[in-house]
């Protein structure tokens, strides 16, 4: 799966102060400064984290496009714009890069849609998962059930 999952600290569908659930992550860039040196490995980490951050909105839109509200993913989008600025530059270049990352994320969500649906069912039951629990859940999921 995506290395971006390494950054996930916790996910929840429990309503909280000012939210109806949340996704918390940490930066995969520990010890790296993309402004100084953007290596291929750093770019891959950035893009994995961007895809993970965008995937919630994309999945919600795929499940029920009428349920999506901008405020649901506002903080995720702000994080994505910050991360993308290291790779995509600014202005029109950044907008184009963000659109490309949106399309890549849509492709990942479509490819792994059975996994996404099962994770949603698991969250309805469990309500909350730590990053460690989430990563184990993915390891336990039988990826051979996916079509090539």
Image (cartoon, helix red, strand yellow):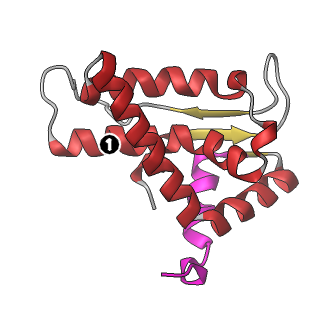
Residue 145 on the magenta segment? yes
Which residue is located at x 31 percent, y 31 percent?
Answer: 30
Percent x, y for residue 72?
71, 27
Q: Of 64 and 78, which appears nearest the observer? A: 64
Which residue is located at x 25 percent, y 30 percent?
Answer: 87
Which residue is labeled 1 in the image? Answer: 45
Q: Of 76 and 17, which appears nearest the observer? A: 76
Residue 102 can be seen, yes or no: yes
Q: Is residue 109 left or right of residue 116?
A: left
Residue 31 can be seen, yes or no: no
Which residue is located at x 39 percent, y 46 percent?
Answer: 48
Classified by dominant secondary structure, the portion drawn in magenta counts as: helix
Q: Secondary structure at mark 1?
A: helix
Question: Is 18 above or below relative to 125?
Answer: above
State the extent of the magenta-drawn residues as a range.
129-148
Q: Is residue 66 left or right of residue 33?
A: right
Question: Is 63 above or below relative to 71?
Answer: below
Q: Is residue 69 left or right of residue 31?
A: right
Which residue is located at x 84 percent, y 35 percent?
Answer: 14
Percent x, y for residue 118?
73, 65
Percent x, y for residue 111?
53, 66
Which image quarter: residue 20? top right
Q: Is residue 18 left or right of residue 146?
A: right
């Amino acid at each position: 799966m995506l290395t971006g999952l390494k950054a996930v600290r916790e996910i929840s569908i429990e309503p909280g102060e000012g939210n109806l659930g949340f996704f918390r992550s940490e930066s995969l860039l520990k010890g790296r400064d993309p402004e100084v040196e953007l290596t291929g490995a750093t770019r891959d980490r950035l893009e994995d984290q961007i895809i993970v951050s965008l995937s919630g909105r994309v999945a919600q839109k795929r499940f029920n496009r009428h349920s999506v509200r901008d405020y649901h993913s506002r903080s995720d989008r702000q994080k994505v714009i910050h991360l993308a600025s290291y790779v995509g530059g600014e202005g029109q270049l950044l907008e184009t890069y963000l659109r490309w990352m949106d399309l890549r994320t849509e492709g990942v969500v479509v490819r792994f849609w059975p996994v996404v649906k099962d994770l949603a069912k698991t969250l309805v039951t469990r309500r909350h998962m730590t990053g460690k629990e989430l990563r184990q859940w993915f390891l336990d999921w039988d990826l051979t059930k996916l079509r090539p």
